[in-house]
Amino acid sequence: MTTPLSMSRVVATAETLGQGAADSHRFAQKRVLLTGEAPVLATPNGRVCLLSSLRLLVRISRDVTVALPGGLDVLERECRVVAEGIAFGGQPVRFVPASGRGVGDYDAVLSVGTLARPGEPWTVIHADGWLARVSSGARDLPAPGVAANPIAALAAACLGTGEVFKRLIGLKPERGALLDGVSWSLYSYALTAQETGPALPAVIETDLLVVGAGAIGNGLLYLLGELPCRGRVSVVDGQAYGEENLGTCLLIGPGEVGTAKALFGERVLQGRLAARGFVEKLDRFAERLGTEVPHPKVVLAGLDNIEARHAVQDLWPDLAIDGAIGPFLCQVGRHPFEGDVGCLRCVFREPPGEAAEVHGSRASGLAATRVADAETLVAEGDVLAAPPEKRAWLAERVGRPVCSVVQEAIAVEISSAPTPRFSPSVPFVACLSACMVASEFVKAAAGWRTMAEPRVQFDLLRGPASVMTIEQVRRRSCLCVERRANIERLRARRTET
């Protein structure tokens, strides 16, 4: 059966597991129930857990049912509005009474609450301060406090959706066992049952540039809208949402397909922050800085390539915070201008490229030494020396300049190359990376210490116990070191204008 474009990235991610997942080919057809306990759902964190879980679950299952306890009419109406806006690729989200529902009707259940139900496909989640809690085993979760922290609440939804995904794909325990009574701090990235961390600042002064409004960027936009931020935000992304983004982007539905990502980000944040979207590449946006747009002090990036990360670093902000993902890897990197911490250019380096002569030889069939003689003409001897599969094509071009033949061959190679599949990605991994980026942003704004200098990462299928810190000092051959004096003068001129 052909995979719909909307699910292409999620399916590709499941396929990376190979024999590690028994049902990676049919997980999207399985049934999922989203429910919860009234006392927890009535809290601010419970609300964010529920709505975020709903937004995530519809992107990994086409058969989602919501069953809420009575007395939560406002929350249920909010759920229905969200469900109507984001549902795609199958039947609409169903809403049923919580009483009398048989868990056996479902392949996985995600509950926002405290009570575990061992022996059933049940996962319970909630957030308490900076703690994201999850249990898919026999251990109940402690009763949460009431302090709102949307970062931990979204992280709990990501961990819970990850547990649902494990059940749906039939993940083998040796690749990633279900989590039992885990409490993980988005403040310290440590496993801790009691340390809920400091309260969020009453106001977070914000002078931000957000680069990338895709899968990680959607999580960031959501959190910036939920946090007590005050100030300005610029959102830069030159692309529009495609159908393939439905499976990975937290906030969008079919109505956003074709919408410019940057303008969508502006719309999400308007009314909360002075937000403006720029539908262009970062190098074009950079020309506006210092005139039309003030230089941002902090840049939050959710990007998927090295070149774009280098462009972020070339703005030389006070702080660049970078979110990165693999199929199941979540990572955050914190790159301050001050201190001996590797910048984005230090950490992300382009691999050595193929020599132009070698590429031209491979494409055309000419020897590399002949490709270097660009002004000479293709001769019969070149045809005889070419690989057999290239001879007929090359024979038709005898007498033409080598340079034009090589250019044509490279153009043919590019145009005939198969269109690459979209990179594997799942929404709960991207949003958890966004949570880590937002955590670093809040800690920087509040002046709190961090362990993410430069990078913290973990495998979501293995859980937060796999968290590791990767330290990296500045490379002595990097621009940030070699041209330090010039960069400092550039930054000083900004403060003078």
Image: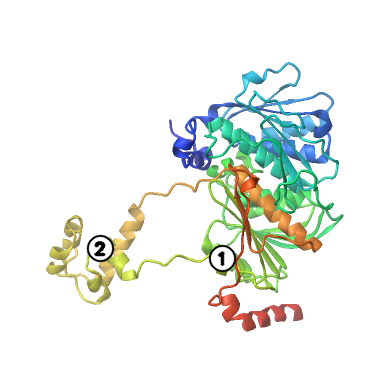
Q: Which mark is residue 364?
A: 2
Say whether marks 2 and 1 touch (CB < 8 Å). no
Figure quadrant of residue 401 = bottom left
State the quadrant of the N terminus: top left
Give the residue drawn at x 66%, y 70%: 288
- Near mark 2 (Cα within 10 A), the count class, few <14, some 14-19 or many ≥20, is many
- Near mark 1 (Cα within 10 A), the count class, few <14, some 14-19 or many ≥20, is many
Q: Which of pointers 2 and 1 lies earlier in the amino acid sequence?
A: 1
99 shown above or below 410: above
Give the residue drawn at x 56%, y 46%: 328
Relative image position of residue 489 (x, y in whole percent): 67, 83
Decide which of 166, 290 is in the foreground and name it.
Answer: 166
Relative image position of residue 84 (x, y in whole percent): 68, 33
Relative image position of residue 290 (x, y in whole percent): 70, 74
368 shown above or below 41: below
Residue under circle 1?
347
State the quadrant of the C terminus: bottom right
Task: Say whether residue 206 is visible.
Answer: no
Decide which of 187, 360 is in the foreground and name it.
Answer: 187
Q: Residue furthest top?
A: 100
Left or right side of 267 for 240: left
Left or right side of 26 for 124: right
Decide which of 57, 465 is in the foreground and name it.
Answer: 465
Relative image position of residue 230 (x, y in whole percent): 82, 58
Figure quadrant of residue 291 = bottom right
Task: Name the residue type under label 1.
Answer: Val
